[in-house]
Amino acid sequence: MKMSGKIIVITGGASGIGAALARRFLAEGAAGLVLGDVQEQAVQALARELDGSGRKVRAQRCDVTREADIQALVATAGQAFGRVDVYCSNAGLVRDGGEETPDADWQLNWELHLMAHVWAARAIIPGMKQRGEGYLMITSSAAGLLTSLPSVSYAVTKHAAIAFAESMAIRHGPDGLRVSVLCPQAVDTPLIQARAEVPGVSAKIDGVASTDEVCDAVVAAMDKEQFLILPHPQVLTYFQRKATDYDRWLGGMARLDRKLRLGISDAAGAPRKEPS
């Protein structure tokens, strides 16, 4: 799918990957953008920066943990531009912790990383099926294919996002709906900048991608209508190794996790400190 002439909705659109996608899609010739984010002032400011006239870019507050907010965002696109061609379900966060993570954080991860995609699909798929075309792009993570050592709740719900994307591709592909799932490792966004003192394993080993590199990968994959979008291509190799010998992969990850917890230095760089 080419972005030229398309009406595109982006959640988490105020900064990071969402803002970069907005800029790139406009450069690719998008006919209209609707940006949603809980940071209302920031997303409105970005909309004015991108399109001072307000004819091509709309923005509004959208808390994707509320189905009503997602419905309102899609309704805005319909009222302003008549349809939604592409929906980028992109908002996310990271909270460190294991099984002891408070229930409230588990629920937040669940709503943000899975139910937001479910609610988006409910809002957009009927119209896309009626027109016989449409695109759902879900931002997951390499953690959804592999894991996240610092955050169990993040890894689990990002796995769920990929499973949901698979189901939508299988169920609605024959209706003309195309689905892609974005699975980057570390990306230079406010999310990782806020965690600069405790860089993740992937950032130390494979580096940090720019948002422009992520956008390049997104546009190229959507042009080919590929399901997996991998800005870090080595993730595919890691995923294949995991599938080929699951037990060996688990053992290796367990050894790495223990090193990090005990503060054992390795070639990848300074380890995370043992949490108090």
Image: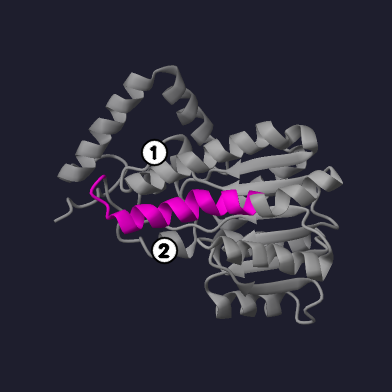
Q: Quadrant of residue 168?
A: top right
Dots 2, 1 in contact, CB < 8 A:
no
Q: Quadrant of residue 198?
A: bottom left
Give me the residue at 24% from left, 48% from top. Answer: 271
Label 2, secondary structure: give it: helix
Residue 191 image offset from top left, x and y in percent? 44, 61
Residue 33 image offset from top left, x and y in percent? 74, 65
In the image, residue 36 sits, relative to residue 123, either above or below, namely: below
Q: Determine if the magenta segment contains residue 249.
A: no
Give me the residue at 57% from left, 59% from top. Answer: 17
Give me the residue at 85% from left, 47% from top. Answer: 131
Q: The residue under label 2 is which amino acid type?
A: Gln
Residue indicated by mark 1: 147
Magenta range is 99-121
In the image, residue 15 sits, relative to residue 253, either above or below, namely: below
Residue indicated by mark 2: 193
Residue 156 image offset from top left, x and y in percent? 40, 42
Q: Determine if the magenta segment contains residue 109.
A: yes
In the image, residue 162 sits, relative to residue 43, either above or below, namely: above
Query: Looking at this view, is 217 or 125 the one in front?
Result: 125
